Image (cartoon, rainbow, N blue to C red):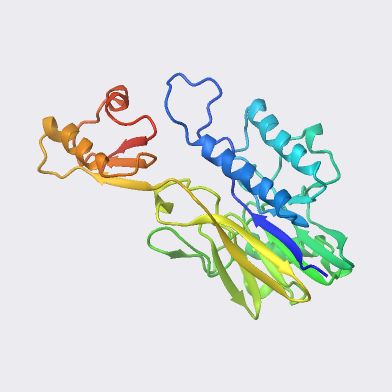
Amino acid sequence: MKPIKILFFSDTHLGFDYPLNPRVEKRRRGFDFFQHFRNILNTAIREEYDLVIHGGDLFFRSKIPINIIDMVYLDLFDFAKAGIPIFIVPGNHERSKLPDSLLISLPEINIYDKPMTYTLEIQGKKICLSGFPFVKGNIRNSFPEILRKTNYTEQKGDLNLLIVHHPLDGASVGPVNFTFRGREDTINPSEIPAQFHAVLAGHIHRRQIHEYNGTPIIFSGSIEKTSFAEMNETKGYVKLTFDDMLHYEFVDIPTRPMHIITIPWEIEQNDVIPYLLDEISLLDRNSIIRINMNGKKHIPENRLRQLIPPTINIEQGFK
């Protein structure tokens, strides 16, 4: 028998930098997020995955224009027609609840609007997927009771997975490797029952794997770089296979390079633009660039758009 194939991804943040009526014509990053999202769903169809799991933050915020909601849900609707079930945990950006729509009423689209355990049978194996929407506040103390409400003890399968949108102790983020430990907003991995073969976690944008008492805790990371704190991170999704044992591997998604250009203090204001253009000429024309002005005056955005390739995203900041 073929191994059971599961695709896990998270933190798609759809709608980010995707204005519906832009006042200024320039390259928008929101198209990249949608393209990665659609490519992942198409990969699941093309490579015949048995099920797909989304670890939360489908949207980039809770109040989403209806047109963006429809775009996302039409993609899910079309994906569901392939017959592959998808399971989605609402994240903190959705404030723990996805918008209602008839487009996501198909039986293949399963949303954790409360703590619950979904069960399905694939190739004679019972798969149990326990999860709950993001919990604001002290998840550390409330986790055991919330987990109990999933009824996971009554649904034991050949493969048991726990899906959450929370950090767990040991998860690290950012350029200085901040590590979550002992916080109220962090799950204590010692509370994870041995019944679960793995924990699939969203919310943390850096992909990583930790083990606690032999249980892998897998953060798929975000599918795109949402800030310059993630500029050196590789993005992608996770492929899991199950053939009486669980195996997992990260799959990379090509993303646009990010760069920070810092204007030296000794550069005069009149020399900022020539210096900047020289620096940009050395970079990939699909780059996303942040300029640290180092006390210099900001350059008008329309002036920058006239000078740099239209394929580049650029922002200015202080340092």
181 up-or-down from 270: above or below: below
144 up-or-down from 267: above or below: below
Looking at the image, can residue 312 be seen?
yes
Report the quarter where the N terminus lies: bottom right
Horizontal side of 48 relative to 9 (left or right) equals: right
Between residues 5 and 174, which one lies in front from this camera angle? Answer: 5
Q: Residue at x 73, y 49 (%)?
A: 45
Number of residue marks: 0
Report the quarter where the C terminus lies: top left
Horizontal side of 111 relative to 257 (left or right) equals: right
Horizontal side of 257 relative to 77 (left or right) equals: left
Between residues 135 and 258, which one lies in front from this camera angle? Answer: 258
Q: Residue at x 56, y 55 (%)?
A: 236
23 up-or-down from 250: above or below: above
Q: Residue 257: where, in percent of width, then height? A: 39, 47
Q: Residue 35: where, in percent of width, then height? A: 58, 40
Horizontal side of 153 relative to 167 (left or right) equals: right
**Furthest residue to the bottom?**
213
Q: Quadrant of residue 95?
A: top right
Q: Residue at x 75, y 42 (%)?
A: 79
Q: Quadrant of residue 140?
A: bottom right
Between residues 43 and 97, which one lies in front from this camera angle? Answer: 43
Q: Residue 87: where, in percent of width, then height? A: 75, 51
Between residues 118 and 6, which one lies in front from this camera angle? Answer: 6
261 up-or-down from 4: above or below: above
Q: Quadrant of residue 145?
A: bottom right
Q: Residue 158: where, in percent of width, then height? A: 83, 72
